[in-house]
Amino acid sequence: MTLPHPNTDQISLPIVLGVLGDPTRLAIVRYLASKEGVPLSCSRFLDLASKTNLSYHLAKLREAGVTRAEVVGTNRMITLRRADLDARFPGLLDSVIAAAGGDPALPAVGGHDLEVPA
Amino acid sequence: MTLPHPNTDQISLPIVLGVLGDPTRLAIVRYLASKEGVPLSCSRFLDLASKTNLSYHLAKLREAGVTRAEVVGTNRMITLRRADLDARFPGLLDSVIAAAGGDPALPAVGGHDLEVPA
DNA sequence: CCAATTGTTCAAGAACTTTTGAACTAAGGA
DNA sequence: TCCTTAGTTCAAAAGTTCTTGAACAATTGG
């Protein structure tokens, strides 16, 4: 079972900007960027919003083409679509992340990579 | 009579992103960027929205700190706050404008600079 | 099989944003 | 002074987006 994602050339600038204009979603992206390459499960973001609400925000990010979600067993592994975003809008993600500031506003939480919850 | 503008350090990233996430406002910014340095009167944007609606969108841009509006007689001259945005969020404006594409979707309309309407 | 875990969907409500027209202000020119 | 031009403000309507809880689905472990 795979989830719908736009392909690179379908990613729209106003939609991406609008999606990043929400503080919860910006925090998610910031955190993903700080853990670049490590797929994180949805539950890693539970400090930012309720489970239902996270589902909503993560769907917005996915539908906008900002993140990719892969179903792995009972988890959904989320990654930033950095290469696609860099290809489509060079420099945009970097400047947004830099502008958002150094440290992501989320607990570091322990552990060996591939962050399936403990 | 001067209008309220946030100062540079009050400009907020999510607010700027949210404001640029609207196609009408993105088009305004694109056009301002293409005429960098030339103050444009509000009426230059009448192809993008009705007069009332423009007033609304231009106020959003101004309140977010993206544009500056100066009252000159019966006109309001609008400029991009490029230096302030570059100082606060380096590279962001450039990558947004580059991502938005080459040619601004607005008639070039004739003329000698300082674009007060004909 | 049963229970727990992970996450979704649905429907409702609250809260914003956008768009509109009518009425207005303020400056400038005849 | 009166008229025009440039743009605003207000209030209402329309449309979106966000948040919530309750109910659901799928996978894994005992």
Image (tube, coloured by chain):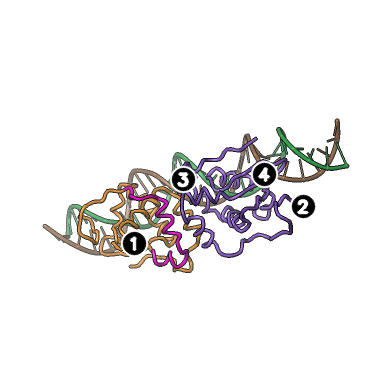
Chain colours: A purple, B orange, C brown, D green
Query: Which of marks 3 and 4 precedes in the sequence?
Result: 3
Quarter of the image for residue A97 reads bottom right
Q: How far apart are marks 1 and 2 (CA)?
A: 52 Å
SS label for mark 1: strand
Camera-near label (1 vs 4) is: 4
Residue shown at the point (40%, 55%) measured from the top left: B97
Name the spot of residue B86 as percent of width and height, x first.
43, 65
| Tag shown at residue A118 | 2
SS label for mark 3: loop
Query: Which of marks 3 and 2 precedes in the sequence?
Result: 3
Dot 4 and dot 3 residues touching (CB under 8 Å): no
Q: Which residues are drawn in magenta?
A: B82-105
Of all chains, the one bearing label 1 is: B
Q: Does label 4 lie on the same chain as label 2? A: yes
SS label for mark 2: loop
Direction from residue B33 to residue C6 in the image, left or right: right
The residue carrying pointer 4 sits among few (fewer than 14), some (14 to 19) or many (20 or more) residues within 10 Å by Cα, namely some
Camera-near label (3 vs 1) is: 3
| Tag shown at residue B79 | 1
| Tag shown at residue A12 | 3
| Tag shown at residue A76 | 4
